[in-house]
Structures are given as C-alpha cells and as structure tokens.
Amino acid sequence: MTPADLSLTVLHAVRRAVDDGALRVEVPPRVKVERARPGGSGEYASNVALTLARSAGRSARDVAAIIEERLRDAPGIRGVEITGPGFLNFTLRSDAGSDLVRTILAAGSSYGHGTALAGTTVRFAEVTESRGVVVAETLVRLLRSQGCDAGVGGRDGERVYVFPGGYEEERLGREAARWALLRAAPHDRPLDGAPLLAQHERNSLFRVRYAYSRVQRLLVNGEQLGVGPSCETPVDAPELLGVLGDHPVVLLAAARHRAPDRVARHLEAIADALLAFQHTVLPLGDEKPSAAHRSRLALAEAAGTVLAGGLSVLGISAPDRI
C-alpha cells in the first residue's frame, strides 16, 4: 500500500461515515497522509479528524473514532491508533512493502502518475530565457502526469520546448545544465555548475544517476548468479520503502506547487537510501541464493524504476553505466 492508496482508503472511510449518517460533513476532495514523525506512533499519520471536527460539531477524537471504526480490516492496514487531540496513526501490514514493489514494477515509469488534477487546464506564457524555458516544459510534464491539461501559450499542450542554448549548456552539457536549473528552488540561484562535472558523491546529479546504474549492474550480476527479481518475502528496508512509497505524493505536490526542485530532492533521497541498501542485495561469499535475495533485488529494481521515471520528468536520462 502506497501513501496515495492509504489516502484513498481513509477518504473512502470518511465517505462511508457520511453516507451512513455517522458524520454530517462535506466529504473533502482528498485526505492528507504523511510519514509519522520520529518518536510518533505507526508509520503514517493523518489529521483528517481535526480538519472535520468543527464542521461535524464533535470533538476530533470522536470523529477519529468514527473513521477508525470504518478502517478496521482495510486491506494493507495492520492497525490504526488515535493519538493526541485526534490524529489517526497507521501501521501497515508486513507484506505492504512487497505490494509496493509489485505496484511500482507493474506501473513502470508511470508509477506516481495519477488523475488528481484531471479537469484542470494550465497554460504557461511563452518565454525565451533559458531557465524559464526549462522550468516551463518540466512543469508541463509534471502537470500532465497528474491528469492536468497543460501546455505553453496557446498550444494544445502536445508540444513542449526543446532546451535552448544558454545557461552553461556548452560547458556543462545539456543534462547537468538542466539539473543546475531545476534542482534549485525557483526563488534561488541555479546551482554552481562546476561541481556537477565531478563524478563524486558530493555531486547530487552523479549520485542519482550512479544509483540507477548500480541497479542495472545488480540485475546483470544477479542473472549471472541465477538470482532474478521476485517479491517472495518481506524486505527489511524501511527507509528505502518509505521514500519509494512517497513518490506519488511528491509528484503531485511538485505539480500543485509548481516546484520541480521537490522531485530532484526526492530523487536524491531515493538514491541515498538505495546506495545504503545495495550491499545487502546479492549473495556474498558462500551464501546461497535465496528468496530473500530475489526479494531484495526486486526492491532494488523498483528503486531504479522510480529513479528513471523521476529523471525523465526532469528531462534527464538515466544511463545504464557511468
């Protein structure tokens, strides 16, 4: 179960409570679910009961209890706890990670795409300045990934800009120049180009692309060892599973806030979690291939899929070898 799936599950519980008369409120268009903070309860949390309490004329804890009752036995959820003034805290089933990996591998590069912005239309003004061009065409892709009818100027949205000559492209190369422009928040100056040319872990673009290339190497090495990716047993990799599960939420937030830098930062988080995890994937020494290795390789492949899809949204390639 992804955070997006959990959000929909909670929203459906609210709708059922309204339909059966337990709550008299207007059903919200969406429910916000986020990772539980350190020291908190469960893996994910939602403040939906607090947001509905006033209009329902009841305490937030009462509203939370009504929603919690309709979440019992929901697929993918192991437990729901009400904490504080009325927060709902969720613990997912131990095999939820396997479900997430299967979801990612089935969706491929479209994982995280959705229809939350369907029915909306966005047209950006024509621009010629390099950064504006790159940001505009990236936002068009982001918005379309969420179902929005997006384009530039009066066009129908099918054509997007090609990166023009300009900001250090000749010196940095097209993709490093794009990263320099998109990784910085819109109100900040572009990244300094020189560090983006170094093949070093301090180079955020190199780290993201290197992480993807490591996945491809793991898949090749796994084939040589007779280990193929397969979701068979739960994998203990909460950090990596957490950031992969957050990907749909990040894409939607980046589209809504017109902030492609959020995608770039999220890809860095995935790369860091993957690079910390990669050493556990394949058999070492005299270890014999097992279901655990096949499951870890499937998780690594899913991470590589998300990295490639995220880079594609930014207009940057994911090379198999660096």
Image (tube, rainbow, N blue to C red):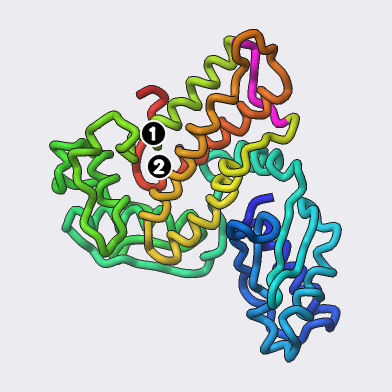
- At horizontal 39% and vertical 33% (from top left) the residue drawn is 209
What's the amino acid at mark 2?
A: Leu
Expressed as whole percent of the image width and height from the top left, the position of residue 224 reads 58, 10
Query: Which one is in front, 138 or 39?
Result: 39
The residue labelled by disc 1 is 209
For the residue labelled by badge 2, is the local secondary structure a helix, a strand or a loop? helix
- Going from N to C along the chain, the mark reached first, 1 or 2, is 1
Above or below, 58 relative to 106: below
Query: Which one is in front, 1 or 136?
Result: 1
- In the drawing, what numbered circle is on residue 311? 2
- Look at the image and tell me whether residue 68 can be seen: yes
Expressed as whole percent of the image width and height from the top left, the position of residue 231 reads 70, 31
Image: magenta residue range: 225-231
Above or below, 16 relative to 160: below
State the separation of the CA atoms marked 1 and 2: 9 Å
Task: State yes or no: residue 227 in magenta.
Answer: yes
Task: State yes or no: residue 136 in magenta.
Answer: no
Pick the quarter of the image with the C terminus: top left
